[in-house]
Amino acid sequence: MTDLGGFRDHVAHVDLSAGDVEYRGVDDEDAKKYIGGRGLGVKYVFDAGPDVDPLGPDNRLAFMTGPLTGSQAVMSGRIAICTKSPLTGTVTDSHHGGWSGARLKWSGFDGLLFDGQSEDPVYAVVEDGEVELHDASDLWGKGVHETLELLEEEHEGAFGKNLSAMAIGPGGENEARHACIVNEDDRASGRGGTGCVMGNKGLKAVVVKSGTKMPKPADSDTFGEGARQAMQVIQESDVTAPNEGALSMYGTNVLMNITEEMDGHPTKNGQYTSSFAMNEVEGTDVEAEKISGENVRENILVDEPTCHSCPVACKKEVEVNYKHKGQDMNVRMESYEYESAWALGTNSGNDDRDSIAVMIDRCNDMGLDTIDMGNLLAMAMEMTDKGKLDDLDDGVDWGDEEHMIDLIEETGHRSSDLGDLLAKGAEGMADEMDAHDCRLDVKGQTIAAYDPRCMKGMGIGYATSNRGACHLRGYTPAAEILGIPEKVDPYEWEGKGELCATFQDLHAISDSFDICKFNAFAEGIEEYIKQYNGMTGRDLSENELMTAGERVYNLERYYNNLAGFDGSDDSLPGRFVEGDEEAIPGQRGSEGELCELAEMKEEYYSHRGWVDGVVTDETLEDLDITAGPGTGVSGSGGQAPADD
C-alpha cells in the first residue's frame, strides 16, 4: 500500500464477467517506479499479460489518474486509459482532458481496472470511493451525445458542476478498431481503439459523481514553489500565455498555416508535402488556410472552454450551419483541432471548413478517432483512384464531403460494405483489398499531421512510438517547428534519435503525472520535479525522475517485444522513406527530401541500449523492470520473441 502523497491508495478491480467489484490499494514500489497515470496503468495492463487477445475477456482496460491529477498543479485535468490495442496489437494509452480525471480523483480513486466481459450491456457509476454497475440495455445503440444526455438526466447531476461521464458510441459497440471514448465535453481518448475494447467488454459508459477531495501535497512549500514557477513560465511563453499565446488564441490549429508554409503538411494521403505542391502539380485549388486556426477564430468560434486548472484554454468551440443533402444541419461542438482538421481536410482533398466541423461532431457521436477516420477516408480515396474499390460501393472521391459525412455514420454502424471496411483500420483495409501501397500507418495506427520528409524527428518518432504512429509520444516538432527547448534543423537527421528518445521519456513523465502535454511548451524538468516531490513527499533528483520516464517507455517496449514486435515493426510508409521503391520525395521547400529512417533507427537503438528494437536483459536490470504475474516470462534475453 502506498504512503505517497497525491494517491488515494484506492483502485477498483471490476470483474465484468461476474459483476463483482474489489477494492485494493496501490503497491508502493510500483507507484514509485512508474509514477502513476500512464506508467502505472501500463504496469497494470502488463501484469495482465502481453499475450492476451485485445478483444478477449483477459484484456485489461485501465482508467488511471496520476499523483498530480485534480490538484492545483497547472493543467492537471487529464486521465489515462490503458489497454492492449485491437488496432495495433501493442500496449496503448490514450488520454483526454476536461474534468473526467479530476473528478475521478476527487471521487476517491487512483484508477478503475475493468476485466472480463459483461453478458449484457452495463455502465459504471463511481461515487464516494465505490463503483456500481447499472443496466445499460436502453443506452446500447445510441450515439455518445444522446447517451450522455440520458445519463445526466438519470443521475440528476450537472456536467460542469458535479458530474462527468465517458461513453462509447456505435463505433465501440460494433468494434470498429479505431473506436474511442468520449466525455461530456467532446474530449476523446481517441487513439488505439480504447472504445473498441470498452464495447467488447459490454461497458457503455463510466459516470463519475465527484466529491471535493482535492489531493493535498505532502510538502506544501515545495509543491507551492513548483506550481507558482510552472504558472509563471506558462504565462511568459509565446505559445501558452493566456489570452495571447498561440495555443490560447488559435488552439492546436495554429499549426495549419505553419506546417503548410514549411512544406511539412501531408496532403492527398501523403502524396504531396503541402496543398501548395498539390495545386501546382494537379491544378487544384485546395487551400489549407481555409481550415486554419486563424480562419476558425474569425468566422465560427463561439466559446473557449478550458479544463481543470488550465489558464491556456486551447479548446476552440465552434458552431456552423451546414446543408447536407438539402437538409440544414446546425452543429455546435468542441474542439476544432489541428490533426482532425488535417485528416478530414487537406489530407482528404477537402478545404470546406464547416463540413469538417460536422465530420468531427459525427466522429464524436459515433465514438471514432478523427485522425484515423480521416486518414482511412484518404486511403479509400487513393484506393478508388487505383481501382481497388471498383466493386465496393464505387469507392469515394477526393474532397467529397457529403459522402465523407455519410461514411462516418456507416463506419460507426458498419452499415455498408465500405463502412465495414473502414472500421477495420489501415492494416485491415490493406490486407483485405491488397492496398498496402495506400496505407499511411505504423503498426496499424495512422500518422498525424506532420510530414517526416520535412520533420525528420517525427519520422523516427512515428516509427518507434510504442502505440503505433503517434506525434504525442515524442513531440519533436516542439524543437523542429517552435524551437522548444531550442531550435533544430527539421531536415537534419543526425541527433534526432537521441532527441526523440528524450522527448519520449519526458512525455512519459507528464502522462504519468497526468498533466497536459502542452505544459512542455513552457515547463521543464525543474518545474516537474518540484511539483512531483512536493505532492508525493519524495526527494527525487531530476535525473532520477528522467530515469522513471525512461523506465515507463522501456516497460511499454518490453510489453510489445513479448507480444511479438521487434525492430522490423519500427517502420514508416514507403512513400516517406529513402531508398524505398514507393518513395515520393518532398516538393517545394522540402524538394527531394526523404526520411533517413535506417540511420536514425541505428542512432536511436544505440541511445536506448536496445538490440534490433528489443529491450535487452541488461537494460531491464538497469531500470529495475520485472515481469508481472500474468506474463509468464522473466526476460526477453535481448532477442525478439516468436510471433503469437
Image (cartoon, grey):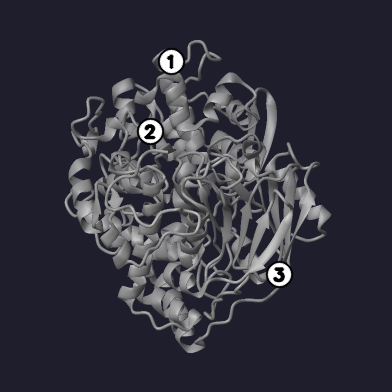
Identify the mark nearer the N-term, 1 or 2: 1
- Amino acid beneath label 3: Gly
Tell me the tag on residue 388. Answer: 1
- Amino acid beneath label 2: Leu
Tell me the tag on residue 129. Answer: 3
Q: Considering only vertical position in the picture, is 40 above or below 353?
A: below
Location of residue 523 (image quadrant): bottom left
> x%, y% of residue 7?
56, 74
Tell me the tag on residue 440. Answer: 2
Q: Residue at x 31, y 65 (%)?
A: 621
In this view, the residue in front, 505 or 593, is: 505
Tell me the tag on residue 237. Answer: none
* Image quadrant containing the N terminus: bottom right
Q: Considering only vertical position in the picture, is 8 above or below 368?
A: below
- For marks 3 and 2, give the CA distance: 43 Å
> x%, y% of residue 398?
45, 23
Front position among marks 3 and 2 = 3
Horizontal relation, residue 362 to residue 39: left or right: right
Horizontal relation, residue 599 to residue 111: left or right: left
Location of residue 463 (image quadrant): top left
Report helix, strand or loop for mark 2: loop
In this view, the residue in front, 80 or 492, is: 80
Instruction: Give neighbour class at mark 3: few <14, some 14-19, many 20+ (Cα, 10 Å).
Output: some
In this view, the residue in front, 380 or 466, is: 466
- For marks 3 and 1, give the CA distance: 53 Å
Location of residue 479 (image quadrant): bottom left
